[in-house]
Image (tube, helix red, strand yellow):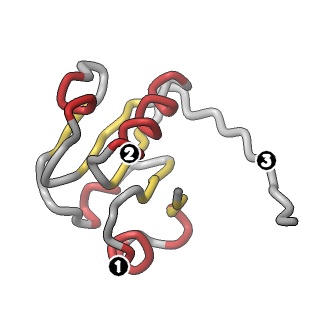
């Protein structure tokens, strides 16, 4: 059985970036928003729930590292494993 290491982060008023625009990305964005983060979601397309959420900043573009500037946390939540693993710097990456 896998062992897990719990992590508690104070992300109140900190920029957190979610890369991806699907349902999983929406759930991650909501949990970050509930923790008080300033959430930015980067994706060429967004699921309907993300489109409607007024408390989340959306950038309708393909991922580029420049979007990570100033981010306290980055969540890779795309359906593209190359983006999730290769393009997001390891010290910032959290994959789901």
Q: Residue lying at the far front in this picture: please name it.
A: 1
Q: Which label sits on residue 82?
A: 1
Q: Quarter holding the N terminus?
A: bottom right
Q: CA distance from mark 1 to mark 2?
A: 16 Å
Q: Is residue 47 above or below residue 71?
A: above
Q: Nearer the viewer, residue 1 or 9?
A: 1
**Residue that mark 3 sits on:** 6
Q: Which label's residue is closer to the chain start, 3 or 1?
A: 3
Q: Position of residue 87 (x, y in %)?
A: 35, 75
Q: Is residue 80 above or below residue 78?
A: below
**Residue that mark 2 sits on:** 25
CB within 8 Å, label 1 to label 2: no
Q: Secondary structure at mark 1?
A: helix
Q: CA distance from mark 3 to mark 2?
A: 20 Å
For this view, does 36 lie left or right of residue 56?
Answer: right
How many numbered markers are drawn? 3
Q: Position of residue 95 (x, y in %)?
A: 52, 61
Q: Is residue 78 above or below residue 50?
A: below
Q: Position of residue 81 (x, y in %)?
A: 38, 75
- The structure residue drawn at horizontal position 79% and vertical position 47%, both measured from the top left corner, is 6
- The structure residue drawn at horizontal position 20% and vertical position 32%, both measured from the top left corner, is 48
Between marks 3 and 2 in the image, the one whose residue lies nearer the viewer = 2
To which quarter of the image does residue 29 belong? top left
Q: Residues within 10 Å of mark 3 (few under 14, many from 20)?
A: few
Q: Residues within 10 Å of mark 1 (few under 14, many from 20)?
A: few
């Amino acid at each position: 059985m896998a062992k897990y290491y719990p992590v508690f982060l104070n992300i109140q008023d900190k920029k957190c970036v979610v890369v991806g625009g699907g349902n999983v990305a929406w759930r991650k964005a909501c949990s970050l928003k509930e923790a008080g983060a300033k959430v930015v979601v980067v994706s060429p397309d967004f699921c309907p729930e993300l489109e409607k959420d007024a408390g989340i900043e959306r950038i309708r573009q393909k991922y580029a590292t420049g979007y990570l500037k100033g981010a306290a946390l980055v969540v890779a939540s795309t359906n593209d494993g190359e983006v999730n693993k290769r393009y997001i710097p390891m010290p910032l990456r959290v994959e789901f």
